[in-house]
Image: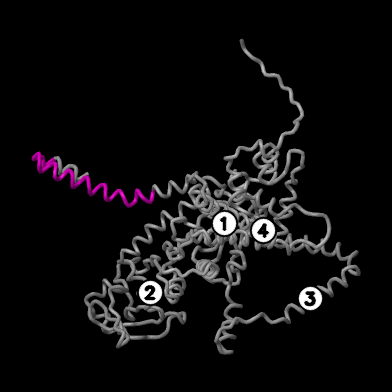
Amino acid sequence: MMGMKQRSFAPLVNVSLDELVPHDHFYRHLERTLDLSYVREFVQETYAGGGRPSIDPVVFFKLQLVMFFEGIRSERQLMRHATDRLSVRWYVGYDLNEPLPDHSSLTRIRERYGVDIFRRFFEAVVEQCQQAGLVWGKELYIDATKVEANAAMTSVKPRFAVEAHLATLFATAGEEAAEGTDQATSHEASAHSDAVQSEETQAPMQLPVALSEEMREDLTQTNKERHDWIEHLGAQDRTVTTHWYQRMADWHVSTTDPDASMMVTKGGSHLGYQTHYVVDGGKARIIVGVLVAPSEVSENKPMLDLLWRARFRWKLWPRQATGDSKYGTEDNLVTIESQHIHAYIPLPDMDHRTAFFSSQEFHYDAKLDVYVCPAGKALHFDRPHSTDRSLRYRARAKECNHCPLKAQCTTSKQGRTLCRSVDEDYLDQVRAYATTEAYKKALRKRSVWVEPLFAEGKQWHGMRRFRLRRLWRVNCEGLMRAAGQNLKRLLKKRGWGRRPCPEGAANAAFSLLFCLPLLFHWLLEASFWVGLSTGDRKGWGRLAYL
């Protein structure tokens, strides 16, 4: 007999939410192993002393973790999801008869906190990972990936038109607001100016470092002129301009997300950002540094700021820093090597772009300060190059024009020239690493250490496309995503039995990379002895060829 289910609901009587959630549920384990009460300490300064009680900051960050683990794309969808999920209600501490926070409250809380609070939350998670012994600190790997912005290419307009429209809009709004509030805000403005002046007059506390006054002033001036990428949240340094190159982002801007810039991917041109990760070389692959920058910013520019922040924030003493060839600029390599850290970064091959002799074919004599060409002629110091960071060496025109190897060396009638960096000794150290096994192992390890983290974020946690707009918001989103990825490793360390799928895939790829050569060698050796015993030399030859 076919049954029919009648829809009838009776009011719940003496039913506890704690009894409805299974005891082996993931959120029970998350609540048991991760105490988020510490977030109240570093968000206390963002709240006033009196007034109506706000949403608990612990509840806000728990909802952010639910969004990360469930792959939810918006606060509205998150609260709809939490309404009919008993486990989420239990995790955030709301009973069945308690109204959940409105989705708009989460947006206002994020604007109240800003990037600093999200960065402190990320660092608190890294600190717990460090206390659990998951941070090794001997190796650091850095890489970046492209992430699409939440804006379409149709929103791109000329920058001068957008800036003129915004300036007119703000000027009109300021005039209307100033008509009725001049007298009411005069006292507040004067008080604010006095407070700002008092803060500026207070000199910052100096660190107990033995430096002379001249060196201290030079360092202070250098730091003022330097573009701090982390402090500016990865924003482009538009004060630096060149006559021979003009950025596309200087001429065009998106009206939907003005901070995003155009980038080229396999699917065509999109607006987007680049997410930078600094990953520890330990087995847990903990992310110790995060920064989201517009796609127009070259990957190599924020590298040093990210490395030094990770190094000094977590008191690490890395023996090597590894990245791909995009990070192989002279400034990065020289700075890393000067700190007694091996820069396992490929140098860009700038000498083999033509058929002429490369600089590697010339021998440098340090005692005489000359270069010796393949024909045995000397190239003497001529003058400094266009910058103070390189020196120019030139051969005599008479010797060079009568040289039988001139067709393979240069077409200039003034003689062959070479440029030598003032830090060429550090660059020679980096070139010498290329023949070592440690260097090759580090490059192989980089491909299976950082890139799977990006794949994990894009496959499982919405990293293919940002859901928020503007640079400070996408940095908040990137910091929260990296904190969640670290939490997965921390939960595994504290006894959660399920292994994250991307991590297992990374371990499998890492094992496959090193086991395939051994397996192939074993097959060849086994087939060789089988061929000798059976006399089938041709069969062994075919197998060896394959």
Q: Earlier in the sequence, mark 1 or mark 4?
A: 4
Q: Do the residues bearing badges 1 and 4 touch, measured as CB atoms within 8 Å?
A: no
Residue 144 belongs to magenta span: no
Note whether 158 is above or below 224 in the view shown: above
Q: Residues within 10 Å of mark 1 (few under 14, many from 20)?
A: many
Main SS, magenta residues: helix
CA gap, disc 2 and disc 1 = 31 Å
Q: Which of the two discs, 2 and 1, labels the residue nearer the N terminus?
A: 1
**Between discs 2 and 4, the one toward the N terminus:** 4
Mark with earlier residue (3, 2): 3
Q: Residue at x 15, y 44 (%)?
A: 541
Assign a secondary structure to mark 3: helix
Q: Is residue 368 left or right of residue 81?
A: left
Foreground mark, 3 or 2, reads: 3
Q: Label 2 amino acid?
A: Leu
Q: Which mark is residue 273?
A: 1
Disc 3 residue crowd, few under 14, some 14–19, many 20+, Cα 10 Å: few
Above-or-below relation of 452 to 421:
above
Q: Residue at x 62, y 44 (%)?
A: 72
Mark 4 neighbour class, 10 Å CA radius: few under 14, some 14 to 19, many 20 or more:
some
